[in-house]
Amino acid sequence: MESEKCQPKEFYLTLSSIREGESAIVHHVDPGMNLNSRLAELGLYPGERVKMVKNRSKGPVLISVKESTFMLGRGMALKIYVKYQVST
């Protein structure tokens, strides 16, 4: 029982929900408007770790993937679902 308390819990959120400085793993992308191919061009695939560099309440988000940093529109970030772990 004690080990169950220490295990992280996983949540699925949109990329736009991640706070600045936090990281998550890309889980899936809602289809539409060639979004998957656009993200693949940027190196953003399911299973890839992404770090939120800048996320204000409105406007685009600034993210870091591997050694690259780029900006995504908020609408695009709302279609990207990430696996987020919280230690309990």
Image: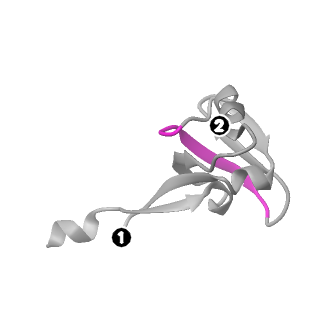
> The C terminus lies in which quarter of the figure?
bottom left
Residue extending farthest right: 59
> Which SS type dominates the magenta stretch?
strand
Q: In which image quadrant can residue 56 be found? A: bottom right
Q: Which residue corresponds to mark 1? A: 88
Residue 48: percent from left, percent from top = 52, 37
Q: Nearer the viewer, mark 1 or mark 2?
A: 2
Query: Which of these two is toward me, 10 or 52?
Result: 10
Residue located at (48% from left, 57% from top)? 84
Where are the magenta residues, as a range? Answer: 46-56
Dot 1 or dot 2: first in sequence order is 2
> The N terminus lies in which quarter of the figure?
bottom left
Residue extending farthest front: 32
Task: Identify whether 41 is placed above or below 33.
Answer: above
Residue 39: percent from left, percent from top = 67, 35
The three-letter code of the residue at mark 2 reads Asn
